[in-house]
Image: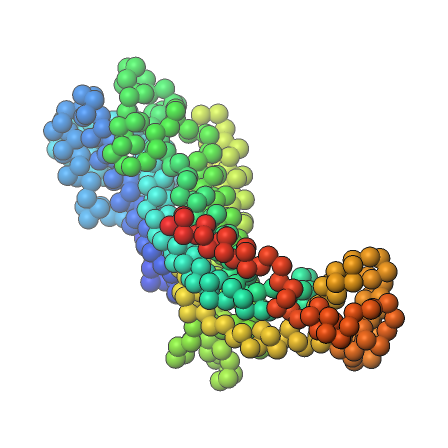
């Protein structure tokens, strides 16, 4: 392990941490946080074993007192880890030096390095996830507010980056909201189990009582108790990685919408403003969507990290040689990047401004063409009606007419001017948009 803030890990004060280590999750996955988690595991293991009478209580007390991160040289442990391809080996050696006399033999009792590292990984994940879940809730609350405020704010729906039919901004925000809720629920439901299996999953050192330890260890650390050791069943880590990957995708989708809405030619939404925010080193007039950019920069890296964890599931026999070791920094990166993206998005959405007038103006740019589907419906939805409206749309584009003008001038449409105006009114062609927004908000309130 490298010390916090060293090359290869941004740390809380790194050059790129403002973008990639924002929010509370970053502090929970630093090297110092990993060290603290490993020591928490060693102390909890001793307490669990003492509770079962497997080690003396004074040994558990001595180990617990020695598991103070301030007593250990993080950089030195990192350097010595190279000799064993595992940081737990030098950590346990250093921990034993902190425990007096015969009690040293109860340090790391019956455990293997993977037991400590895997359990620490689950502990780190639980602590980081608490921060991520809080940031997701902040983002979801902002979406709920936007959905309610703009339930009936008409805008152009866009498919394949082209204007499609009218929707409401409230519906768009409600879509963001439900996706965030699903991600929150998926992460909150993860089972993060302790690991304790000894050399090869039998715990033979404990002479038939090893299976009694994991439930007690799980209770000590507020983690899940596994059915049996999972040294080469990497499902818990893979499920964590996949849930983070899906969450990152949701965050990235919302950020993509925001950056497109913030384009100069669109200008339907804008990120929070502050002195110096969004500035360019060359162009004084720029107001770049830095929040959306930062979210996307974080989540762009996530799929490859998820793939790396999934590849690590191909572990050999009872202990992997390489695939497991590749998980350590990868899992931390996934938590840090997803957490940073969640923090950025929460701040972005809380301060997002929406220009309803610009949304309507942009919808009107196409002079009624997005209402063509609604006109077909008003004409009865027949093939003949579709052909007539298709012809009117083509004429409108070719001759620079509004759809209304083209329809009145062409054959096959028998709507009166008044009925045609109704058919061309975006506010009367929103279908179930309002009901969907209401449903999303109700579900959000029930989930709170």
**Front-lying residue, 33 or 413:** 413
Percent x, y of residue 386: 82, 61
Write the residue at 50% across / 31% down: 315
Q: Is 275 on the left or on the right of 384, as rendered?
A: left
**Front-lying residue, 194 or 289:** 289
| Residue 213 visible in rendering | yes
Write the residue at 43% across / 45% down: 185
Q: Is 410 on the left or on the right of 314, as rendered?
A: right
**Residue that sits furthest to the bottom in the current view:** 284
Write the residue at 32% across / 46% down: 127
> Is 87 rendered above or below residue 144?
above
Q: Quadrant of residue 202?
A: top left
**Front-lying residue, 10 or 377:** 377
| Residue 87 visible in rendering | no
Q: Quadrant of residue 389?
A: bottom right
**Residue that sits furthest to the top in the current view:** 208
Percent x, y of residue 401: 78, 79
**Front-lying residue, 180 or 192:** 180
Write the residue at 81% across / 73% down: 407
> Is 190 rendered above or below residue 423?
above
Percent x, y of residue 282: 51, 82
Q: Is 84 on the left or on the right of 372, as rendered?
A: left
Q: How many marks?
A: 0
Percent x, y of residue 405: 79, 78
């Amino acid at each position: 392990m490298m010390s916090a803030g060293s090359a290869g890990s941004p740390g809380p004060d790194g050059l790129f941490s403002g973008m990639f280590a924002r929010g509370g999750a970053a502090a929970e996955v630093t090297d110092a946080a990993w060290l603290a988690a490993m020591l928490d595991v060693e102390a909890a293991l001793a307490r669990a074993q003492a509770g079962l009478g497997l080690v003396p209580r004074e040994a558990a007390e001595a180990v617990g007192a020695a598991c103070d991160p301030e007593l250990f040289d993080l950089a030195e442990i990192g350097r010595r880890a190279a000799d064993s391809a595992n940081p737990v080996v030098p950590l346990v050696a250093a921990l034993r030096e902190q425990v007096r006399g015969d009690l040293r033999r109860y340090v790391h009792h019956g455990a293997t390095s993977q037991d400590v590292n895997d359990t620490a990984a689950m502990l780190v994940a639980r602590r980081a996830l608490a921060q991520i879940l809080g940031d997701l809730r902040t983002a979801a609350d902002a979406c709920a507010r936007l959905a309610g405020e703009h339930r009936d704010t008409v805008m152009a729906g866009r498919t394949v980056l082209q204007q499609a039919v009218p929707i409401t901004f409230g519906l768009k925000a409600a879509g963001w909201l439900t996706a965030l809720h699903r991600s929150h629920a998926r992460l909150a439901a993860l089972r993060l189990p302790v690991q304790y299996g000894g050399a090869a999953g039998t715990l033979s050192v404990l002479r038939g009582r090893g299976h009694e330890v994991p439930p007690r260890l799980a209770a000590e650390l507020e983690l899940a108790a596994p059915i049996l050791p999972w040294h080469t069943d990497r499902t818990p880590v893979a499920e964590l990685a996949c849930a983070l990957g899906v969450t990152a995708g949701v965050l990235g989708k919302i950020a993509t919408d925001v950056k497109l809405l913030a384009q100069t030619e669109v200008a339907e939404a804008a990120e929070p403003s502050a002195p110096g925010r969004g500035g360019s080193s060359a162009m004084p007039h720029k107001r770049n969507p830095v929040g959306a950019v930062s979210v996307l920069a974080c989540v762009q890296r996530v799929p490859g990290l998820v793939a790396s964890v999934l590849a690590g599931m191909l572990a050999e026999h009872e202990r992997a040689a390489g695939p497991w070791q590749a998980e350590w920094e990868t899992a931390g990166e996934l938590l840090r990047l997803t957490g940073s993206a969640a923090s950025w998005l929460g701040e972005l959405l809380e301060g997002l401004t929406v220009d309803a007038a610009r949304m309507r103006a942009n919808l009107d740019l196409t002079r009624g063409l997005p209402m063509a589907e609604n006109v077909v419906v008003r004409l009865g939805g027949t093939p003949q009606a579709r052909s007539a409206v298709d012809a009117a749309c083509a004429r409108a584009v070719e001759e620079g007419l509004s759809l209304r003008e083209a329809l009145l001038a062409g054959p096959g449409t028998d709507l009166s001017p008044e009925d045609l105006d109704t058919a061309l009114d975006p506010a009367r062609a929103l279908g179930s948009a309002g009901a969907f927004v209401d449903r999303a908000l109700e579900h959000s309130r029930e989930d709170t």
